[in-house]
Image (cartoon, rainbow, N blue to C red):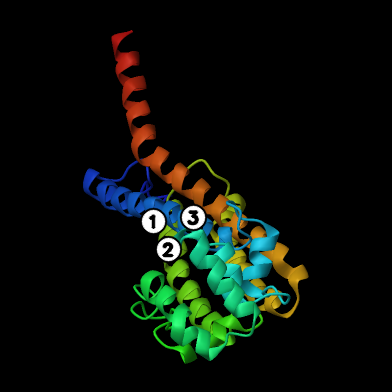
Amino acid sequence: MNMQQSGYNLTTLGVSIRGLFTGYLLVIGIGLMVAGGQVLLTHGMADGKFGLSIDDVVYSYYGDRQSSKLENKLNGSMQDKAERVVRQDIIKWVREGADRQQWDTKIEQHFNDNCVKCHGVIPGLPNFNTYQGVLPSAKIDEGASIDSLTRVSHIHLFGIAFIFFFVGLIFSLAVGISTWLKTFTIVMPFIFLIVDVLSWWLTKIHPSFAWLTIIGGFGYTLASAYMWLTSMLQMWWYPYRGKISTEHAWLQ
């Protein structure tokens, strides 16, 4: 006998357990929306236009082999971090070969005024306090490095998998949903997560795999949203609806 057969499901939970589950789902829901906003403001600006597109994915992981990463960032997600004149000076310096003398006389000050408050303080970002620190970003943009892909992949897999596990655990107590549909819905976010992360590595090799990133992200977002909404409705609307129906029948 499983928990649902014994009468233990989302519609019969005590108020304290419903509060626990609801608090978790609310925090996760807000967190996922913030994460979506962060993607739009970083990867979604890789091509210089707001909104996530295939080009954004390609520039983020495969790179723009016709330009430098520094120039692409200044024309994309970092566009609002410095005035146009400053960005033009830096881009011109990069295109002309990133000369050390120009760095010492002019370009270093641009970086000190506009970049080092993050690049040089926040772990994981390139350190722009020195010429040698800037130089790798002034080379041809080959997208995400193997080191960064490895770091982000393991964080993404471990962290997001925990979120899907607990959201799926709560959803498993839902009623009125066929076993196959419930199982399919619980498993799909994990599959799409693997597709999403794998697509980063494949896109690094060839840009045609960028579509998998869009498919993976859309897939686990849709499945998670369905589980989230279903769980919240069954915890709070279903019991209330049943109480109203009982009171209405008694009045008749």
Mark 3, other Cα within 10 Å: few <14 / some 14–19 / many ≥20: some
Q: Earlier in the sequence, mark 2 or mark 3?
A: 3
Q: Which of marks 3 and 1 is in front?
A: 3
Label 3 SS: helix
Which amino acid is tagged 1?
Answer: Gly
Above or below — where is 162 with respect to 106? above
Identify which amino acid the numbered label 3 is placed on. Answer: Gly
Q: What element carries label 2?
A: helix
Q: Where is residue 8 in the image (x, y as percent from the top left)?
A: 35, 49
Q: Residue at x 46, y 43 (%)?
A: 229
Q: Is residue 131 left or right of residue 188?
A: left
Q: Are marks 2 and 1 in contact (CB under 8 Å)?
A: yes
Q: Name the residue under label 2.
A: 163
**What residue do we see at 45% from left, 87% from top?**
104
Question: Residue 36 — which label?
Answer: 3
Q: Mark 1 points at which residue?
A: 31
| Amino acid tagged 2 | Ile
Task: Tell which of 58 and 129 is nearer to you.
Answer: 129
Q: How far apart are marks 2 and 3 (CA)?
A: 15 Å
Q: How crowded is mark 1: few (under 14 residues within 10 Å), some or many (20 or more)?
A: few
Q: Can residue 172 be seen in this view?
A: no
Identify which residue is drawn at 67% across, 74% down.
63
